[in-house]
Image (tube, rainbow, N blue to C red):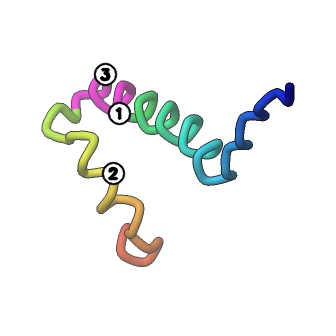
Amino acid sequence: MESVQPLPRMIGALLRIPFQQTVARVYQRLMEAGYTDLRPTHFVLLQQLRRRACE
């Protein structure tokens, strides 16, 4: 009888795990720094900012 091999995870799925942990860590640090009005959903917008827009 053949054993069924689990499908390997795609690279996107593997990278999502550390990304989510990084977002959670940054969010926690922002809360500790007093930025209590930010929510995790704001990170979607913050990712799109270009350096010029931040200066």
Which residue in the structure is indicated by mark 2?
43
User: Residue at the spot x=72%, y=35% of the render?
Assistant: 6
Return the mark for residue 52.
Answer: none
| Percent of width and height locating residue 49 | 38, 69
Looking at the image, which residue is at 34% across and 59% down? 46
In this figure, which residue is indicated by the disc labeled 3?
32
Return the x and y of residue 20 as percentages of the image width and height: 47, 37
Q: Secondary structure at mark 1?
A: helix
Callout 2: SS: helix
Would you place residue 44 above or below residue 34 in this image? below
Say whether residue 31 is magenta.
yes
With 34 as the anchor, is 16 left or right in this view?
right
Residue at the spot of label 1? 27
Residue closer to the observer: 25 or 16: 16
Q: Nearer the viewer, mark 3 or mark 2?
A: 2
For mark 2, does the 10 Å Cα neighbourhood hold few (<14), some (14 to 19), or many (20 or more) residues?
few
Using the image as rendered, state which of residue 42 and residue 52 is in the foreground.
42
Give the SS element for disc 3: helix
